[in-house]
Amino acid sequence: MPPDAGVGRADPFTTLTSELLPVGDGHEIHVESVGREGGMPAVYLHGGPGSGCQPDHRRLFDPERFHAVLFDQRGAGRSRPKGFREHNTLPHLIADMETIREKFGFERWLVVGGSWGATLALAYAQVCPNRVSGIVLRATFLGTRAELDAAFLKTLPQFYPALSDDFIDLLPEAERKQPLQAYWRRILDADATVHAPFARAWHDTERILSEHSPTRMRLDLALLKSSGALPATPFMEAHYFANDCFIRPNQLLDDAGKLTGIPGVIVQGRYDLLCPPATAHALASRWVDAELRVVERAGHTLYDPGVRNAVMKAIADVASRIAS
């Protein structure tokens, strides 16, 4: 049955459980479960870092087949304290996943994640391979500085040269030799007059890169200086990216051999400018049990044409491989 099925139930995607789970260090993470108790265990990992889960993410999982868990990572979404970056590293997130898995009594689970969620999925699976029954990735991001440099310093000026000028020109000339580090430093500055315009500029630029057909292609310089609410994701991204995602360079690719025996599917948009096909191809070449599926006429986001359906089919297909 397709994941959006469930005729006869009032709302098959209503949460079974929803709570704030204390995980130590002053953090409480929002955890919810959907589907059917006794179903195949699965976990969904949101992107960002810092974006949080959305109700629509529940619909990726067939409610008659899965018992799926979705959680907002430390400082993200409905987790508390909101935006809290202390004691917030990749190893902390991996430990939180183990706390959640043990809470639900799952021996192993199917791990699903896209973009930063793919980073966390790979890191978790390489640390805890015996706890992973399968993996579905979308828009593979390996957490490297080289990938960020490629997206913002090479791809951006090639595809959106005027936007690239807007992005760079926001910085003082003395800081333009290392623009990404300058952005992260300013986003993490406690002074709102410093961090606000750069958080908005980072968010808007990244969003344009993530869309196959963006509705606008320039920064609104007046809006950058507004006093409205700020997007949350740039602050967590700056924290992680400035610290190389708390992993060594090329760690996730170098350790891909640890995934041997874990079935997986890598879903990749052909025109993803943030996480291009070459990254997914490199991972697939080292992870022998994974299948790479390229979605034509699609970019980065889960909501691009064909990507959502491809992810749902991948989840169903990997589940069938697990059950066989």
Image: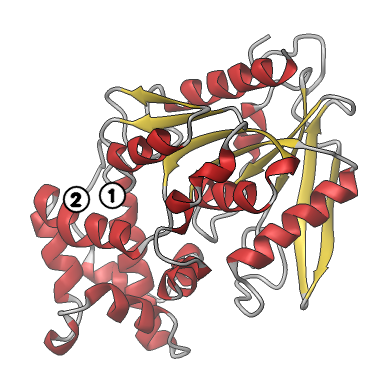
Relative depth, front residue between 296 and 107: 107
* The C terminus lies in quadrant: top right
Helix, strand or loop at disc 1?
helix
Disc 1 vs disc 2: Cβ atoms closer than 8 Å?
Answer: yes
Q: Position of residue 148 (x, y in %)?
A: 31, 60
Q: Where is residue 58 in the image (x, y as percent from the top left)?
A: 67, 33
Is residue 74 shown to the viewer in this render? Answer: no
Horizontal side, residue 110 vs residue 237: left or right: right
> Residue 208 — which label?
1
Disc nearer the start of the sequence (1/2): 1
> Residue 193 — which label?
none
The three-letter amino acid code for the residue at tag 2 is Met
The three-letter amino acid code for the residue at tag 1 is Ile
Classed neighbour count for the residue bearing mark 1: other residues with Cα under 10 Å, few (<14), some (14–19), many (≥20): many
The Cα–Cα distance between marks 1 and 2, rounded to whole angstroms, is: 7 Å
Q: Residue at 65% of width from left, 59% of height from top?
A: 73
Relative depth, front residue between 8 and 288: 288
* The N terminus lies in quadrant: top right
Residue located beneath label 2 in the image: 217
Helix, strand or loop at disc 2?
loop
Q: How was the colour assigned to the protein in this rendering?
A: secondary structure
Q: Position of residue 263 (x, y in %)?
A: 59, 27
Horizontal side, residue 109 vs residue 60: left or right: right
Q: Is residue 211 above or below residue 238?
A: above
Quarter of the rendering containing residue 268? top left
Q: Residue at 42% of width from left, 69% of height from top?
A: 241
Quarter of the rendering containing residue 5? top right
